[in-house]
């Protein structure tokens, strides 16, 4: 598999990463080298193996349904650039 | 409304049901509704660096219960994926959801549309139900060009219940949504409150020419917070799509919002293609394993569900399929009905009770826009009234008067009957006296009746009732009157 310049732009848009046009050819080359490296996995013989969901051979520990977090709004709002009436403020997001 | 002739409607629903856990799906923050903004949003819900989600055992149990209730496959191993998209009410930049291995797949429910002889049953298959986290809320008003973000809801556990596109009308879609709504409430896994957003229905709607097997382009309707609006929104959308195509246009795949004030849907956004979400397995979460013995234990814990209850009401109480369906349509109604029956003790009369719960009580609740759990007339109070109907103290008409007084808060049935002197006259000699008095005062009418004018029977009933101030027992009155008048020659 390899990535075209337009596919790279699409993926960058989805990730909200701004790319300089001039850097795209080099990035395409780098990314395709990485993809080619990963392609080697295809040569492995996996026919009799079940797909793994996680590299650790363990199962998800569960927590009891208990409320143990207290109100930390004041501390958590401190990290935000803008707040009002206990809300985080962000640039308007309606389309 | 455009003609539906020649068109087939295809509807699939996605229902998001908030699970009734105390804490969030991956954190120990509270899920209680209505708190001040952001007081129930912890570091995990905010997606701060370095935090690790830990799955709530109760959310797993509740999702599994739903699967068991609809006869679905509950996966012994399921896993979580990240669904990537950027929206400020989802601060991590992704939603933890389940794509490839959902906890529940398959299953079906039976819906009924129409009533009485026109009732039609249909099986609707489900695709899947998966666990995921809810997003926060965006508030778009009053912040001078900014959007306010409240993350209290972020991380609330949801099951997203996805149907196959098997519904063919708005009525079927509503019947299906109501059935799922009833099931999650019976299971106690969701409070079902649509106003507060605990139970949210999105409808995928498309149309195609009859006979066509390929699906038409669909639109997704969001923002529907009642069953009534769901039906109207789908009907509007069906008409819009058919008119668009008949006028030579094409349907665009998009998300549309329903506006109840204007009774129309309008475009919210063009739909991003599914692969744009770039799902991948969440490395923070391990596979979820459900032990078979635990699953068996949960299965044994299932309560009696709506269909089973409706069948029992028919076989045990002799109720009609329609009444049984109405009484079991919500857990709260069934509970009220059963409590009323219990409170009537040995005088239990299920049909009488069903008539009142689905009739006078339902009408008043509907008028006052109240749920049955908010009824000003409790099940005990209604039982007190029905006992007086069962023992013939009250005719149905008088009972209705007493019921209205109870609704208005005038006390229990017995005290209202005393205060208003509403006791029905069941003393047969008193009724006979009244009948004789009326017949003696109307000899010409009696003669007419006996010579064949049998319609006058109603006149006599009315006269006696008037004399009795409406309190004569109607059955006894009829019997006495028939005996005293003798045959009317015109009647056979």
Image (cartoon, coloured by chain):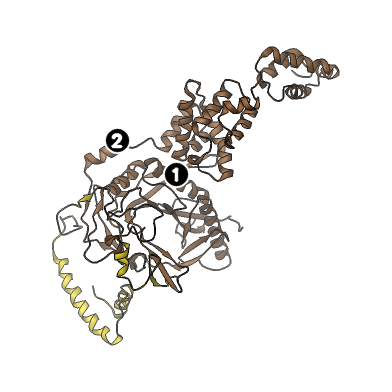
Residue A82 in which image quadrant: bottom left
For chain A, give the colour: yellow
Compared to residue B16, the image places residue B421 above or below, namely: above
**Position in image of residue B12 (x %, y %):** 44, 54
- Binning the other alpha carbons within 10 Å of mark 1 as few (below 14), some (14 to 19) or many (20 upward) gives many
**Position in image of residue B76 (x %, y %):** 24, 47
Q: Residue at x 36, y 36 (%)?
A: B303
Q: Looking at this view, is A43 or B66 the one in front? A: B66
- Binning the other alpha carbons within 10 Å of mark 2 as few (below 14), some (14 to 19) or many (20 upward) gives few
Residue sticking out furthest to the right: B444
Q: Residue at x 52, y 48 (%)?
A: B171
Q: How far apart are labels 1 and 2 at the CA level?
A: 21 Å
**Position in image of residue B480 (x %, y %):** 71, 15
Q: Residue at x 69, y 12 (%)?
A: B429
**Disc 2 is attached to a residue of which chain?**
B
Could you say whether the residue bearing mark 1 is in a helix, strand or loop? helix
Residue sticking out furthest to the bottom: A22
Residue B491 in which image quadrant: top right
**Disc 1 is attached to a residue of which chain?**
B
Compared to residue B479, the image places residue B149 above or below, namely: below
According to the image, label 2 marks what residue? B300
Q: Earlier in the sequence, mark 1 or mark 2?
A: 1
**Position in image of residue B266 (x %, y %):** 52, 65
* Residue B489 visible to the viewer: no
Q: Looking at this view, is B444 or B381 the one in front? A: B381
According to the image, label 1 marks what residue? B179
Question: Which quadrant, please, contains the C terminus of chain B?
Answer: top right
Q: Residue at x 44, y 32 (%)?
A: B311
Asked if the residue under mark 2 is in contact with the one under mark 1, i.e. CB atoms within 8 Å, the reply is no
Position of B243 with respect to B331 (left or right) is right
């Amino acid at each position: 598999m390899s990535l075209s310049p337009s596919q790279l732009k699409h993926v960058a848009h989805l990730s909200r990463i701004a790319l300089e046009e001039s850097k795209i050819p080099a990035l395409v080359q780098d990314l395709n080298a990485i993809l080619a490296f990963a392609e080697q996995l295809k040569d492995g013989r996996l026919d009799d193996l079940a797909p793994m969901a996680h590299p650790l051979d363990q199962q998800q520990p569960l927590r009891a349904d208990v409320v143990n977090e207290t109100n930390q709004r004041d501390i958590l709002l401190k990290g935000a650039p803008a707040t009002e009436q206990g809300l985080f403020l962000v640039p308007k997001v309606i389309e | 409304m455009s003609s539906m002739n020649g068109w087939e409607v295809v509807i699939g629903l996605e229902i998001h049901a908030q699970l009734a856990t105390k804490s969030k799906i991956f954190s120990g923050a509270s899920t209680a509704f209505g708190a001040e903004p952001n007081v129930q949003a912890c570091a995990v819900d905010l997606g701060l660096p370095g935090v690790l989600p830990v799955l709530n055992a109760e959310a797993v149990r509740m999702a599994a219960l739903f699967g068991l209730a609809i006869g679905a496959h509950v996966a012994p191993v399921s896993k979580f994926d990240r669904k990537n998209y950027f929206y400020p009410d989802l601060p991590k930049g992704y939603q933890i959801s389940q794509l490839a291995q959902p906890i529940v797949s398959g299953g079906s429910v039976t819906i009924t549309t129409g009533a009485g002889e026109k009732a039609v049953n249909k099986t609707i298959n489900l695709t899947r139900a998966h666990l995921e986290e809810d997003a926060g809320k965006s508030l778009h008003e009053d912040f001078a060009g900014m959007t306010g973000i409240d993350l209290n809801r972020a991380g609330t556990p949801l099951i997203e219940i996805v149907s196959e596109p098997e519904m063919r009308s708005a009525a079927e879609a509503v019947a299906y949504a109501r059935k799922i709504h009833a099931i999650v409430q019976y299971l106690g896994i969701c409070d079902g409150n649509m106003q507060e957003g605990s139970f949210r229905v999105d409808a995928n709607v498309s149309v195609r020419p009859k006979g066509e097997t390929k699906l038409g382009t669909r639109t997704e309707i969001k923002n529907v917070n009642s069953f009534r609006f769901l039906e109207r929104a789908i009907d509007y959308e069906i008409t819009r799509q058919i008119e668009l195509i008949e006028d030579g246009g094409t349907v665009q795949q998009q998300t549309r919002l329903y506006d109840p004030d204007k009774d129309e849907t309008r475009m919210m956004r063009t739909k991003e293609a599914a692969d744009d979400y770039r799902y991948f397995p969440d490395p923070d979460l391990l596979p979820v394993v459900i032990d078979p013995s635990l699953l068996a234990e949960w299965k044994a814990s299932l309560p009696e569900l709506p269909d089973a209850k409706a069948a029992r009401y028919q076989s045990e109480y002799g109720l009609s399929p329609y009444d049984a369906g109405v009484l079991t349509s919500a857990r709260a109604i069934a509970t009220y009905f059963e409590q009323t029956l219990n409170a009537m003790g040995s005088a239990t009369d299920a049909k009488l009770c069903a008539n009142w719960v689905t009739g006078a009580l339902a009408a008043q609740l509907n008028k006052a826009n109240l749920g049955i759990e908010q009824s000003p007339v409790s099940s005990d109070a209604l039982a007190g009234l029905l006992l007086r109907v069962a023992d013939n103290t009250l005719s149905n008409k008088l009972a209705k008067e007493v019921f209205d007084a109870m609704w208005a808060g005038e006390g229990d049935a017995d005290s209202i009957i005393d205060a208003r002197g509403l006791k029905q006259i069941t003393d047969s000699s008193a009724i006979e006296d009244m009948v004789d008095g009326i017949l003696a005062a109307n000899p010409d009418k009696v003669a007419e009746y006996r010579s064949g004018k049998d319609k006058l029977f109603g006149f006599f009933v009315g006269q006696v009732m008037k004399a009795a101030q409406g309190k004569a027992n109607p059955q006894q009155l009829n019997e006495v009157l028939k005996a005293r008048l003798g045959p009317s020659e015109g009647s056979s």
